[in-house]
Amino acid sequence: MRHPLKVSDVMTRDVITVTEDTPYKEVVALLAAHHVTAVPVINAYGGVGGVVSETDLIRKEEFQGARRLPWALRWWQRQARSRAAGLRVGELMSRPAVTIDQTATIPEAARLMAARGITRLVVTDGEVLTGIVTRSDLLKAFLEPDDRLLQRVRREVVVQALWDDPFGLEFAVQDGVVTLSGEVDRHSTAELAEKLTAEVDGVVGVDNRLTWMYDDTMSAPGHPAFTGGPAPSVRPCESGSSGPGGAHDRSDRIRCISRLRDRPKPQEQRGRS
């Protein structure tokens, strides 16, 4: 089983919070003192009621002198101007807060940020605030040294996924780009290795140089796949076989495939009979 990085692995746990009654100037001072751009707002019930950010606070500056704007524009902006006039966090904040569970994966968090057009997510465990995760936090996976990334790729791709042919793969990592080399039994195994490697957190790219002995992704003329019928399962060894490839080990698979290649065609068998 693969173990991708979770939001809890990269989030900030020591979170500065405010309440809905926190005055405007106090929250501005908190943001400046802690060098953050937003803080979660805790409501009267102890839950996360929203988030107040620099974007919410800067509206006071944005709407100064707004009375000189045309009436139609002021009417269109009436809700934003009302929030800008607020004196306490409860009147200024954005609600509801966009939250994510701490067990979510990094790609899930990135997709949620992109979909909502935001740069941070409030992290929860059920209804309890456990942290906050930003875009810069999600990039931490790419800071891992190549040697540690190599260990993770081997663990998640070979040990936990490609149990059928683990010894045919060789890995090398440079600047986050993983090079796959070696020989595997099937074309589909080579494609799967590339897909699984690309999904490992911290991998920048994959250079797939794998070769294979048997191309199970293509069918020959007359094969049921060409006529719309079901493709038969591939079993190189009729007896004493084990595993998806029908062989006990790599050398057995090579001998089995050689026997298939040397097997007489149906026409030749009929001619001999």
Image (cartoon, rainbow, N blue to C red):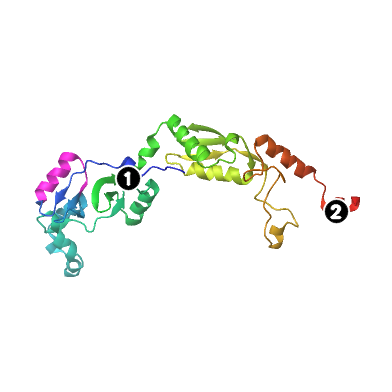
The x, y position of residue 108, in whole percent, is 38, 50
* Of pointers 1 and 2, the one earlier in the residue sequence: 1
Amino acid on which the number 1 mark rests in the picture: Arg
Relative side of 165 to 147, left or right: right
State if disc 2 and disc 1 touch (CB < 8 Å). no
x 69%, y 37%: residue = 252
x 39%, y 34%: residue = 144
Name which quarter of the figure residue 257 lies in. top right
Q: Was residue 25 drawn as part of the magenta stretch in this picture?
A: yes
Amino acid on which the number 2 mark rests in the picture: Gln
Q: Which residues are magenta?
A: 24-39
Front position in the image: 139 or 256: 256
The x, y position of residue 52, in whole percent, is 19, 52
How many tags in the picture? Answer: 2
Note whether residue 126 is visible.
yes
Residue found at the very far top of the displayed protein: 147
Secondary structure category for the residue under label 1: helix
- In this rendering, the answer to whether 169 lies above or below 69 is above
Write down the residue under mark 1. Answer: 135
Name which quarter of the figure residue 247 lies in. top right
Q: Was residue 251 drawn as part of the magenta stretch in this picture?
A: no
x 53%, y 38%: residue = 158
x 87%, y 54%: residue = 270
Relative side of 225 to 32, left or right: right
Write down the residue under mark 2. Answer: 267
- In this rendering, the answer to whether 91 lies above or below 146 is below
Q: Residues within 10 Å of mark 1 (few under 14, many from 20)?
A: some
Q: Residues within 10 Å of mark 2 (few under 14, many from 20)?
A: few
Main SS of the magenta part reads: helix
